Amino acid sequence: MATLVTQARLLAGEGWKSYRLLDSGNGRKFEQYGLRRFIRPEPQAMWSPRLAEWNADGEFVPGSDDDGGGRWIFDNPVPEDGWPLDWRDGIRFNAQCTPFRHLGFFPDMAPVWDWMGAQLGERDNAQTLNLFGYTGVGSLALSRYGKVTHVDASKKSVAQARENAALSGMEDRPIRWLVDDASKFTAREVRRENRYDGIILDPPKFGRGPKNETWRLEAGLPDLVADCRRLLDEESSFLFLTVYAVRMSSLSLAGLLNEHFADMPGEIEHGDLAVREDGDGARLLPTAIFARWSNPR
């Protein structure tokens, strides 16, 4: 029976050559992506900045409502089609200033990719599933351990994921790139009686599928987690769930996993994702909450 760890965990990421969190404060964050620096909104940065000045190439200025609108303002030329960055293990990806304030990947996911790799160990025959896979950096990281099924409702994101695979020289890796609604795909996999060794899901608060299906996190997540559980068994290694920008506790996510994974071996944990600032006096900037099930074998 899976053990529920009630004490929250912290999963903190550090900067690397292609990415650094330079500073944060006053509801914003100051980041470096390769040779370029940007300012973006960050409501959780309620403290004051450490640096006296933020000299950025561009800033995303949010709209006046809560619907995620806004626009980029640039002080220096920035390539519209993006520019390549590196993670490690040969993984490369294209950073780009998107209309949604993101830059084509989520830096705080780097320790998650490391954690998933640790669960799979030296395997090269694992079957993993990346739901809401976005631009595919996580799928490329998982592909060193075996076959990956990458699912995202956005045709544009899946196309970018394929381009990132080509940029990394990994277009021949065993990855299925699918434009599909995550909930519908997972339900079909249950009916097919398929199984996976690991699942990662990073659902948005709100979204639409390729056929205009509507996704709302609070309404859709319980059934999706239930179906994910049916795709895992006692020989599986993990499920990792991240949630951004919601009024929800990580403990509630853990409770949801506990309902469906109580009959499984291993343990259920929950907590915060964070990124550590660069330099002296570095602080931890929380970015998301998570819950995870793991089954060390």
Image: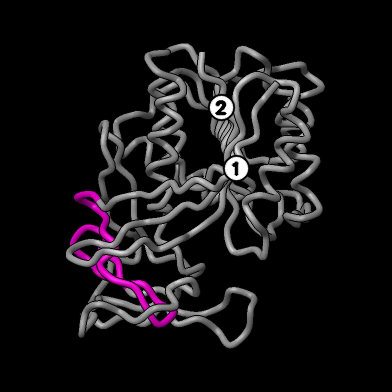
Colour scheme of the rendered structure: one colour
Does residue 200 lie above or below 213 as drawn?
A: above
Q: Is residue 103 left or right of residue 176?
A: left
Q: What residue occupies the far front of the structure in this picture?
A: 7
Q: Give the quadrant of residue 284.
A: bottom left
Which kind of residue does numbered mark 1 sit on? Ala
Image coordinates of residue 7 in percent, x first then y, are 57, 45
For residue 24, what is the image quadrant?
bottom left
Q: What is the spatial separation of the Cα atoms under label 2 and label 1, in whole angstroms?
A: 10 Å
Which label sits on residue 291? 1
Q: Is residue 158 magenta?
A: no
Say which residue appears at 55% left-offset and 84% top-offset: 63
Q: For the stretch drawn in magenta, what is the main secondary structure? A: strand
- Residue at (73, 55) in percent of width and height: 217
**Residue underneath mark 2:** 294
Image x and y of residue 77, in percent: 24, 75
Q: Nearer the viewer, residue 173 or 29?
A: 29
Query: Residue 277: horizontal and vertical position, in percent?
Result: 28, 62
In the figure, is residue 56 to the left or right of 133? left
Residue 54, above or below 202: below
Judged from the image, the secondary structure of the residue bearing numbered disc 2 is strand
Q: Is residue 120 left or right of residue 221?
A: left
Q: In the shown orientation, is residue 272 left or right of residue 55?
A: right
Q: Residue at x 72, y 28 (%)?
A: 261
Q: Residue at x 63, y 84 (%)?
A: 65
- The boundaries of the magenta stretch are 16-38
For this rendering, which residue is in front, 251 or 190?
251
Q: Nearer the viewer, residue 278 or 145?
A: 278
| Residue 27 is a magenta residue | yes
Which of the pair 129/297 is nearer the observer? 297
Label 1 Cα crowd, 10 Å radius (few <14 / some 14-19 / many 20+): many
Tag count: 2
